[in-house]
Image (cartoon, rainbow, N blue to C red):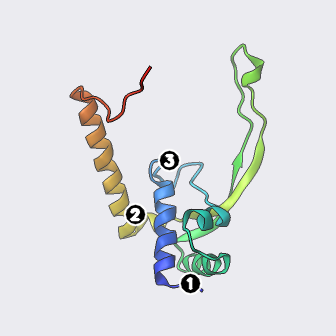
């Protein structure tokens, strides 16, 4: 079964999948997450519960079932091995325009911007990264 917490967890998962990718509803490729990935990322969730929560989010107009294609990537270089074949599309759920206007999205985006600002400022001050690679 599903409850409001599962619905919120799935919505927040979709927001965090979108953050950092393109962060715009108008981007050509949005984060598309399949139901199997949602179940794998949220442990202890049944397929039925996830489907019911997703159905409720679709009904609310916050997400939509969509398909994201992966066209062939063509390399114009001299190495023919760099040319990749097209792959099957990814079918799953993505945020709608309405979801980008929710307080949850705005807060997540604000937090992401703040973390990017902190990262950029630390890099400009010449601070070392937290980890270093040993030779």
- Nearer the camera: disc 1 or disc 2: 1
Q: SS of the residue at dot 1?
A: loop
Tell me which label, 3 or 2, sits earlier in the chain: 3
Report the disc number at residue 2.
Answer: 1
Q: Quick check: can you spot residue 122?
A: yes
Please report the residue visible at 75 percent of the width from the left and 32 percent of the height from the top: 84
Please report the residue visible at 37 percent of the width from the left and 59 percent of the height from the top: 108
**Separation of residues labelled 1 and 2 (CA atoms):** 22 Å
Q: Residues within 10 Å of mark 2 (few under 14, many from 20)?
A: many
Occupied quadrant, residue 40: bottom right
Tell me which label, 1 or 2, sits earlier in the chain: 1
Q: SS of the residue at dot 2?
A: helix
Q: Position of residue 55 (x, y in %)?
A: 62, 79
**Separation of residues labelled 3 and 2 (CA atoms):** 14 Å
Up-down: is 94 above or below 70? below
Residue labelled with disc 3: 21
Report the disc number at residue 105.
Answer: 2
Up-down: is 119 above or below 27? above
Occupied quadrant, residue 124: top left
Q: Position of residue 120 (x, y in %)?
A: 29, 35
Tell me which label, 3 or 1, sits earlier in the chain: 1
The image quadrant where one finds the C terminus is top left
Q: Tell me whether circle 3 and circle 2 mark residues in contact (CB < 8 Å).
A: no
Q: Position of residue 7 (x, y in %)?
A: 51, 77
| Of 54 and 23, the residue lying toward us | 54
| Of 132 and 87, the residue lying toward us | 132
């Amino acid at each position: 079964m599903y409850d409001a917490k599962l619905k919120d967890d799935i919505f927040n998962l979709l927001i965090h999948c979108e953050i950092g990718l393109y962060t715009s509803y108008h981007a050509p490729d949005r984060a598309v997450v399949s139901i199997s990935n949602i179940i794998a990322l949220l442990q202890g969730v049944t397929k039925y519960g996830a489907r019911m929560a997703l159905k409720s989010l679709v009904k609310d107009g916050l997400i939509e079932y969509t398909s994201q294609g992966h066209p062939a990537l063509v390399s114009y270089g001299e190495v023919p091995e760099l040319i990749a074949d097209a792959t099957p599309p990814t079918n799953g759920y993505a945020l709608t325009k309405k979801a980008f206007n929710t307080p949850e999205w705005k807060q997540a985006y604000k937090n992401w911007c703040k973390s990017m600002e902190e990262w950029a400022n630390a890099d400009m001050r010449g601070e070392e990264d937290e980890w270093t690679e040993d030779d």
